Image (cartoon, helix red, strand yellow):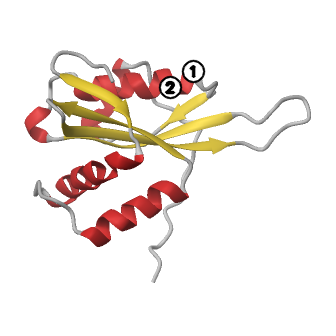
Amino acid sequence: MQGSGRHTVGLIKDEDLLDVARLRGHWSTGENQQPATDFVDALRAWWTAENRVGWLARVDGYAVGMVNAAIFTRIAKPERTPQRWNYVANMWVDPDFRRRGIATDLMAYAVAWARAEGMVRIVLAPSPMSISLYESVGMRAAHDLMRLDLDPPI
């Protein structure tokens, strides 16, 4: 684990998922408290069922930020092996720890990992507040993707 200043960044491991659940709860509810066991179990099931990788930022050992990525493998072509993309999501830093370079370091780790793994593309859906962060690590707006929002399941 390395980072800038007093924070460290490392790959999310199974033993970190309680911290990931706490951060997700804080992000969703605005309350920083231990998550319910059923939520931790649901998050663990989601994490292990998907082809994911993620990074956790800590300050003095305390988890304060996270980002994860889903790995998407495209269908092979006769002339080349399948290409892989990273879909980055769930970038979040505790409001008390923002503007300290933590999100930038989380993204730097995600980009470095994708390059080392031979990924050909990183995509994400930015919030208006996060666009400058993503631009700072070399991302650009893309107009070659489309989406269709489906009605939520009943």
In the rendered view, does 114 fall on the left or right side of 125? right
Quadrant of the drawing holding the N terminus: top left
Of residues 38 and 73, the one nearer the viewer is 38
User: In percent of the image, x 40 and y 42: which residue is there?
Assistant: 13
Contact between marks 2 and 1 (CB within 8 A): the answer is yes
Q: Image point 12% across, 56% down: which residue? A: 30
Helix, strand or loop under label 2: helix
Which image quadrant is residue 71 in?
Answer: top right
Count numbered badges in the picture.
2
Residue extending farthest to the right is 78
- Mark 1 belongs to which amino acid? Ala
Q: Is residue 133 visible?
A: no
- Snapshot quadrant of residue 83: top right
Q: Does 62 sit left or right of 2 as displayed? A: left
> Residue 121 appears at what percent x and percent y?
58, 30
Q: Position of residue 133 (x, y in %)?
A: 30, 26
Residue at the image point whose x is 81% and y is 32% from the top:
81
Q: Which residue is mark 1?
A: 116
When asked about the image quadrant of residue 152, the answer is bottom left
Name which residue type carries label 2. Trp
Can the viewer see residue 146? yes
Establish if 65 lies above or below 23. Answer: above
Residue denoted by label 2? 113
Residue at 36% of width from left, 66% of height from top?
A: 41
- Asked if residue 33 lies left or right of residue 141, the reply is left
Residue 104 position, x and y percent, is: 29, 24
